[in-house]
Amino acid sequence: MDTRQRFINICHFKSVDRPPRWEATMGFMPQTIERWRKEGLSPHVKTHRDVEEYFGMEPRVFLPVNSGFTRPPFDPPFKREVLWESGEVVVFREESGIICKAYKKPHETATPGVMWVEHPVKTREGWEKIKWRLDPDNRKWPDWKNLREKYDNFPYPLALTICGAFGFPRCLLGDKRLLLMYYRDPRFVHEILEHWLELYKKICSTVIRNVRVDYILIWEDMAWKKGPLVSPRIFKEFISPYYEELISHVKKLGVDIIMVDSDGNLESVLGLFIEAGVNAMMPFEIAAGMDPLKIRREYGDALAIMGGIDKRVLAELKKAIEREVLSKVPKLVEEGGYIPFVDHNVPPNVSLDNMKYYISLVRSITERNLQSD
C-alpha cells in the first residue's frame, strides 16, 4: 500500500497499514531551522522538504497548476514590485495585487509573516477592472501530457487547491471591507462569489479531466481563537450554496474527498461545512480551542480529522509531549479517519531533540497499533 492509498483509505475510514508520515506537514518556521542547525542539523538542510526528508516524513503534494490557494488564481498575476523600503521594512505589491508590509529581519521568536496593508478591490468598479485576470475561459494551462507522465503512478496523494468562498473575497477586499459588505452590499459579495463558482467549476473540470486528482483542498483561514469571522447565518447565505454547487460538480467528476484548511475555532460552523459536502478538515488548532476528540464524538465518520497536535507542547518536557500524543493519537487512529500532525508551523522554541522524540513517539504508536491488527 502506498501513501496515496493510505490517505484515500483514511479519508474513507477504511483500514491502512499506517497513516502518512505527515507529523509536521504544516511546516517549520525559518527561525526553527536556524535553531536546529545550532543543535546539529546539517547546513545542507535548508528547505521545508529538506527538513521533511531529514525526519523521514512524506510530502504533501499540490498539483502545479494555477488554481490558487491562499490567494486567488490571477492569470496573469499582478506585477510584483517594491513600493517603499527602509533598512528594516519593505512595502511591496505581491502577485495577488495585495500591498504588503514585511520586516526584512523578523524577530527570532516571531512568525516571519507578511502584513496586508491594502487590497486590490474597494468598490464594484474596482472589481470590474481586475476581473479579467480571473477569466474562467482565458487561462494558461500546463503541459498535460508531461503532468500525466509525472503523476499517473505517483505514490503520494495529489491535491487540487482552491482559494475558498471566504478566502477569495477576503483577499480581494480585505477582512474589514468584506465583513461590512455582507451587510451593506450583499449583492456585490454574491456577484464576486458567482464569479468564484464559475471560475472554479471551470478550473476543476479542466484539471480533473486531464490529470489525476485525489482530493480538493480549500483554503479559508476564516476563524480566530474565539470563533469564525462569520456567523452561521452569514455562512448559510454566502458560503453554503456556493460550496454545495462546487462540491456537487467536483464529485460528479469523480473526486469525493473535500478538505478545508482553516486555523482558528470553527466549531460553530463545522456542521455547516459538513452539510455543504466537506468531509475532511485540518489542522484543528488546539490553542484556539479545537478539540479533535470532541469533534469526533460529535460528527463521527462524517469528518476525517487531520492534525490536532498542539505545537506549543513540543517545547515542553518529554512527559508533556507524551501526554499530548497519547491522549489523542491511539484512540483516533484506532477509529480511523485521522492523520496526526502538528496544528501549525513548528515554532523556534522547539528543540531538535524534542522534535525527534515527538516524531518517534507518533510512529511507534501508529505503526505498532496498525501492524498488530
Image (cartoon, rainbow, N blue to C red):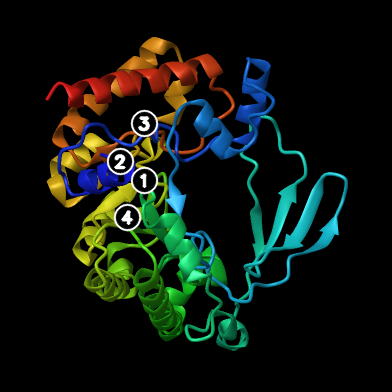
**Picture residue at 87% right of the left edge, 50% below the top:** 86
Asked if 227 appears above or below 25 in the picture, the reply is below
Q: Which-is-in-front pick, marks 4 and 2?
A: 2
Element carrying mark 4? strand
Ranked by sequence position, the earlier of labels 3 and 2 is: 2
Q: Which-is-in-front pick, marks 3 and 2?
A: 2
In contact (CB < 8 Å): disc 1 and disc 2? yes
In contact (CB < 8 Å): disc 4 and disc 2? no
Give the left or right position of residue 74, taking residue 231 as reference: right
Q: Amino acid at mark 2?
A: Asp
The residue carrying mark 4 is 259
Q: Which of the numbered marks, if any, corresponds to residue 240?
A: none
Ranked by sequence position, the earlier of labels 4 and 2 is: 2
The residue carrying mark 3 is 309
Give the left or right position of residue 325, taking residue 221 as reference: left
The residue carrying mark 1 is 155
